[in-house]
Amino acid sequence: MNRREFLQAGAAVAATSGMTARSYAAIVGANSRVQLGIAGLGRRAVVVMRGGFTKDARVQVAGLSDVYDKQAQDFQKKFNLASVPVDVDYRRLIDRKNIDAVFIATPDHLHVQMAHDTLAAGKHTYLEKPTLHRWHERETLVKAAADHPKQVLMCGMQQRSGAHYKRIKQEYFDTGKLGDVVLVRAIWNNFSWQRRVIPNEPKPAGLNWDLFLGPAPKVPYETARYSSWRSYHDYGNGVLADILTHWVDVAQWMLNDDKPQQAAALGGDYQLHDGRDNPDTVSAIIKYGKWNLNFESSVLSIRDQKPPSVFFEGTEGTLDVTRGGFTFSPNKGEETTFKSGEDLEQAHVKNFIDAVTTGSSLNAPLSVGLAATVPVEMALASYWGKKIATPKDLDGTNV
């Protein structure tokens, strides 16, 4: 299956999947709330739980899973979930008959197998980004979604649920108000939480290292590989997966163009020198038919740093878009600035629960997650292969 066939398959799955209110009732039965399981209880799970699931009265957390008992205990304390059962192995969680839906917030290399198994277990699935860790995983996920069309599968691209993003799309792009966009610039710096020394210590007794590794190469335990897994290519793809995924999704959405033609990415471990193999600094250029996306990211803390943004340059002006609002600067006339107080996590969780309970449309179905993966995987193919990559370079790769 080549890239075009793969994306078409993903779109077909997205068009046919989803639950109706009647079929939802058949699964949930007498429960008045969606019984939620959470797999992976680290930083991202805390953010989405606090911003989204705790604010939706239709949700009840009914099961938890994490490979480290202390992380699970900390999560239980943080959200007053002491009575909620915890499974070390996520497969025990998804086997629980009372679970209706599962939020997967594990390290990236575990995403696809977990999503596959969760769908097969008959559970609705909220899969954190990135949708894929490796390009070759795509067919597994597409097939799983196609084989289980009654299950909702949403990708964690929360900008898709943001009201001001939808407004921007309609007001500035669909109307042509911005003109022809030729360049998109995306910048994200100040990963202060990565700037830390992690001394190597013995493996905690309550950490199941084999379950953490999953499909990754079997290596001895190292503290940094667990505590800073995003730094290692075996478990994540660094800022290209963490950040470029979001920003390229916004750009492709706004410009109705998800067909990248070429990608070039350069970078390295320029600052941290902490044993990582993923870069701490990276620049990438993604070429489309009529526009480029330039992406830059580093771990530096910059004084008076603007919020991370996607900056569109059009023939009629510029548009600077952040998660907190936007500024439109026309070539002629006054600027328009809008500040949003919306919590994107809350909006995205609401969309997921709406889809589960009523069968309404997802803002970020599988097709969206897959489309955002293509330019990211091309950038990765360029970075690791030290060449300009095209979509053809993805087939048969394991970047």
Image (cartoon, rainbow, N blue to C red):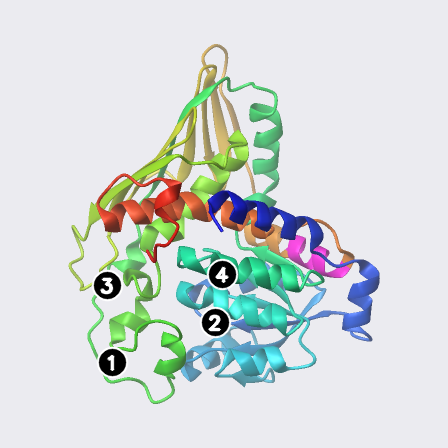
Q: Residue 306: x, y in percent?
A: 36, 38
Q: Cβ–Cβ below 8 Å for labels 3 and 1? A: no
* Image quarter of residue 290: top left
For the C terminus, which image quadrant? Answer: bottom left
Read off the magenta span.
350-357
The residue sitting at the bottom extreme is 205
Residue 371, placed above or below residue 273: above
Q: At 45% from the left edge and 18% from the top edge, which residue is drawn?
A: 317
- Of the residues tagged 2 and 4, which is closer to the observer? 2
Question: Which is nearer the N-term, disc 1 or disc 4?
Answer: 4
**Mark 1 Cα-neighbour bin, 10 Å: few <14, some 14–19, many ≥20:** few
Q: Is residue 398 left or right of residue 120?
A: left
- At label 3, the amino acid type is Arg
- Of the residues tagged 1 and 2, which is closer to the observer? 1
Residue 381 in sight: yes
Q: Which residue is mark 4?
A: 47
Q: Which residue is mark 1?
A: 220
Q: Is residue 328 magenta?
A: no
Q: Cβ–Cβ below 8 Å for labels 3 and 4? A: no
- Of the residues tagged 2 and 3, which is closer to the observer? 2
Q: Which residue is mark 2?
A: 40
**Mark 4 Cα-neighbour bin, 10 Å: few <14, some 14–19, many ≥20:** few
Magenta stretch: helix, strand or loop mostly: helix
- At label 2, the amino acid type is Gly
Q: Which mark is residue 129?
A: none
Distance between the alpha carbons at the discs numbered 3 and 1:
22 Å
Q: Which residue is mark 3?
A: 196
Q: Is residue 392 left or right of residue 201?
A: right
Distance between the alpha carbons at the discs numbered 2 and 3:
22 Å
